[in-house]
Image (cartoon, grey):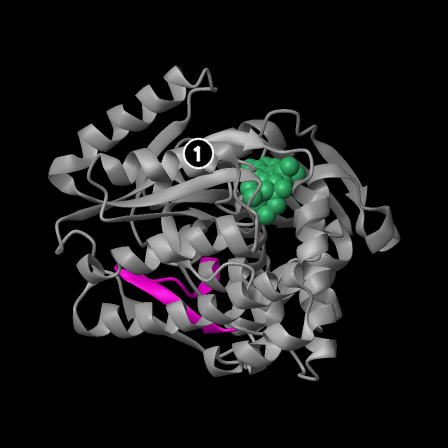
Amino acid sequence: MSRAGKIDTGPAAGLAAAFADRYGREPDGLWQGPGRVNLIGEHTDYNEGLVLPFAINRATAVAVGLREGRTARLASGFAGAEPVEVDLKAFRPETAEGWTAYPLGVAWALEQAGASIPGFDILIASDVPVGAGLSSSAALECAVATALAELTGAGLSRAELAAIGRRAENEVVGAPTGMMDQYASLLGAEGSAVFLDCRSGRAQLVPLTLEAAGLVCLVIDTRVVHAHATGGYAARRASCLRAAEVLNVAALRDLSTADLARAERRLDEETFRRVRHIVTENDRVRRTVDLLRTDGPGAIGALLDASHRSMRDDFEISCPELDLAVETARAAGAIGARMTGGGFGGSAIALTPVDKEERVRAAVLDGFARGGLRTPEIFTVLPAAGAVRIAGP
Ligand code: ADP
Ligand code: MG
């Protein structure tokens, strides 16, 4: 790849050379898939509702080379990821283990979609933090899906590749996630958010021009994941499904704010609050999209704040660290802030005027230090392009 243009920065820096060292051959190309931040629309995806994520300028890069036969060799710079060699002929979704379930799951799902996948060598490098709510899993899946689809001439659209990444995560990794992450990682574009209707699969780009508005999007990774995160996610999902049954709708997506009074009469107090979060969150996504189109990102702060309150009080998926991050960022000058991702830990985002960035960072660090909490990781993200080939012959 050095012949085609050396990559000096980002996760792909030095990756072609490392691939050649490890496998004794040149890769056929380098691809990358970005992580994502969900701007607004939390837990709405599995309720067939609306989400508004954006692909970020942090990505997982893969160097890939096809090989004769049906053996795959996989390695990653990710801590604890042991290199493996597997026989693809013998691969079964239920036997996939550890981190290799993501790339091998994608290869399997591509085959299920009709692609013919030969053996391959792959080396992975990433600057998407793992488990921070930025979807390092989708970044990896989408990088691999884009690479293998292109190298094998599978002729699949980006939306089809997103479905393949999701299938890998659902059926091979075994995580019951919605479609948001893979769509964001594949359909994202610089300066845009991806407005996705999780029922129809329709995706539209919406301008998210932070720089022009004098704003930065700070990610505050609390670096905590509470023990009940997985159980909490499953429990929220189950209550939403139950509520839809009681209210006799196909999904909570079918309710509007005008239906809330009826819902309150028919549901217990806690389930009603779960429903109110989903219904008002869908409404906030719509209003955010409208405001981004008319007034720009400077106008959406109050909607981010309202989204956080709804997750904290009605859906009960926040935690003290996320609340602290949001409150201190707002008090120090952010125009809007909310937790992002599944909840019970992970990251918050704070939309912040450029000239207040340092103040917000300092205030959050100080707040965590005073609380005796682990130092959060704070960095900015920009809306970036979706998965793409970055080098190759
Ligand atoms: P996230 O919120 O970051 O998506 P997940 O638990 O969904 O967290 O996915 C993280 C998992 O994805 C890791 O534990 C690992 O198995 C896999 N993964 C992510 N990035 C990499 C990488 N660069 N190399 C190998 N495996 C990775
Ligand atoms: Mg994930």
In this picture, is 363 found above or below 186?
above
Given the image, on which type of amino acid does mark 1 rest? Asp
Residue 105, percent from left and from top: 72, 54
Residue 206, percent from left and from top: 30, 70
- Foreground: 274 or 335? 274
Which residue corresponds to the image point at 67% horizontal and 82% vertical from the top-left? Answer: 250
Name the image quarter holding residue 242: bottom right
Taking the image as four quarters, which one is ligand 1 found in? Answer: top right
- Asked which secondary structure carries label 1, the reply is strand
Write down the residue under mark 1: 221
Name the image quarter holding residue 208: bottom left
357 inside magenta stretch: no
191 inside magenta stretch: yes
State whether residue 315 appears in this view: yes
In this picture, is 210 found above or below 109?
above
Q: Which segment is the magenta one?
A: 185-197
Q: Is residue 309 left or right of residue 63?
A: left
State whether residue 15 appears in this view: no
Q: Is residue 70 left or right of residue 180?
A: right
- Foreground: 84 or 319? 319
Residue 80, percent from left and from top: 66, 25
Which residue corresponds to the image point at 58% horizontal and 62% vertical from the top-left? Answer: 273
